[in-house]
């Protein structure tokens, strides 16, 4: 497989090329995400072959060279396809002074798949994007059919919220609305123990996808009080429940289920056929009450009991000496410095 950097004309239609990939495209490989990551000093590198488009994010590390990161990609559909493109991509990375290549292919996790991947010299590392395990829902059928396919708890929660007067609205991603969302998002993050990025980053992310016609902000009310918010994205035939928040001092039963149901109907109208509920505990721990995201897992599996586990993230050392320094010292120091200076993740 011959890989090369895309031309300006090819980059101008990049989303269409990503959507034509064997995996049907991934939103984190799209041009909007690449542009967004420039805020973190990542440089998008658009790479192409006859039948594959790859978005690489490049960041320089002082003294080591460059990290090449392929978020939720490359967009292949099998281990065989991964093997075909891996060495050409590694060769191009080496030529451009990269010391490591990080990939996150959405291949389903099986013992045989993991064994084959490791045979390529790839090293398993913690995932960057929080969707290495998730819940997927087929939303191609008619809404009544989808609703009937949910388990009894999910259907009951949706109907209960409707009876109790919960209202879900699609709202514009204005600065005022995004600030309301971010305030609730911050409170949710603090209570649930996860980290979010600064407001400027989040606002530009939500605004970018909304302006591109790919994203929608949802507000959920009860008795005229805002109790939950969410932002969802449609990319090709896939939709993603990207960010969400709710207040805990007014827990209205079924409100989040009803909001998710409105998101699903909106995504269908935009052409989505497969809905990703945005990450959950792995299938091996979905019933583990000690898992920090047990509650999220219960909520999301009320739409589909099956958890999809992907293989996760892998590093391919390009320059072994520099990569060893990165693993031993560099990554920890760089992440710590970035957090202290900017208050957000280096990745």
Image (tube, rainbow, N blue to C red):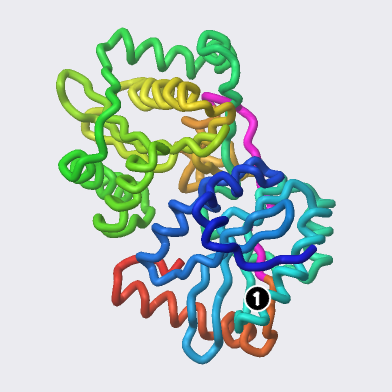
- Mark 1 lies on a secondary structure that is helix
Q: Residues within 10 Å of mark 1 (few under 14, many from 20)?
A: many
Vertical side of 65 occupied by 9: above or below? above
- What stretch of residues is rendered in magenta? 302-315
Q: Is the stretch drawn in magenta largely helix, strand or loop?
A: loop
Identify which residue is drawn at 68% across, 75% down. Answer: 92
Which x, y percent locates residue 294?
A: 49, 40
Q: Is residue 327 left or right of residue 34?
A: right
Which x, y percent locates residue 336?
A: 39, 77
Vertical side of 75 occupied by 149: above or below? above
Vertical side of 297 occupied by 97: above or below? below
Q: Which one is in front, 223 or 322?
A: 322
Q: Which one is in front, 111 or 93?
A: 93
Which quarter of the figure is the N terminus placed in? Answer: bottom right
Residue of label 1: 93
Q: Quadrant of residue 333?
A: bottom left
Farthest residue to the front: give it: 9
Q: Is residue 125 left or right of residue 31?
A: right
Q: Is residue 285 magenta?
A: no
Q: Is residue 307 magenta?
A: yes
Q: Quadrant of residue 7?
A: bottom right
């Amino acid at each position: 497989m011959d890989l090369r950097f895309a031309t300006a004309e090819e980059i101008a239609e990049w989303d269409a090329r990503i959507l034509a990939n064997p995996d049907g495209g991934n939103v984190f490989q799209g041009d909007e995400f690449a542009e967004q990551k420039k805020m973190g000093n990542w440089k998008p590198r658009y790479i192409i072959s006859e039948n594959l488009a790859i978005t690489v994010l490049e960041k320089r590390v002082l003294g080591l060279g460059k990290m090449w990161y392929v978020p939720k990609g490359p967009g292949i559909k099998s281990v065989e396809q991964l093997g075909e493109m891996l060495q050409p991509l590694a060769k191009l990375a080496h030529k451009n002074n990269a010391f490591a290549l990080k990939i996150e292919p959405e291949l389903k996790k099986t013992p045989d798949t993991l064994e084959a991947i490791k045979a390529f010299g790839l090293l398993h590392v913690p995932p960057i994007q929080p969707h290495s395990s998730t819940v997927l829902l087929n939303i191609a059928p008619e809404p009544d059919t989808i609703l009937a396919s949910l388990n009894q708890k999910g259907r009951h929660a949706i109907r209960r919220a409707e009876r109790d007067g919960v209202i879900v609205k699609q709202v514009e991603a204005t600065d005022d609305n995004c600030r309301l969302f971010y305030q609730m998002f911050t409170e949710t993050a603090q209570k649930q123990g996860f980290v979010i990025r600064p407001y400027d980053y989040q606002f530009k992310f939500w605004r970018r996808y909304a302006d591109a016609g790919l994203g929608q902000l949802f507000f959920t009310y009860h008795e005229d009080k805002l109790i939950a918010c969410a932002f969802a994205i449609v990319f090709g035939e896939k939709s993603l429940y990207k960010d969400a928040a709710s207040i805990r001092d007014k827990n209205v039963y079924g409100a989040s289920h009803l909001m998710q149901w409105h998101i699903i109907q909106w995504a269908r109208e935009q052409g989505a056929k497969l809905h990703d509920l945005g990450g959950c505990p792995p299938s091996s721990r979905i019933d583990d009450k000690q898992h920090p995201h047990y509650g999220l897992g219960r909520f999301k599996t009320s739409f589909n009991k099956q958890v999809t586990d992907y293989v996760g993230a892998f590093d391919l050392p390009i320059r072994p000496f520099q990569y060893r320094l990165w693993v031993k010292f560099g990554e920890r120091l760089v992440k710590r410095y970035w957090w202290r200076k900017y208050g957000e993740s280096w990745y």
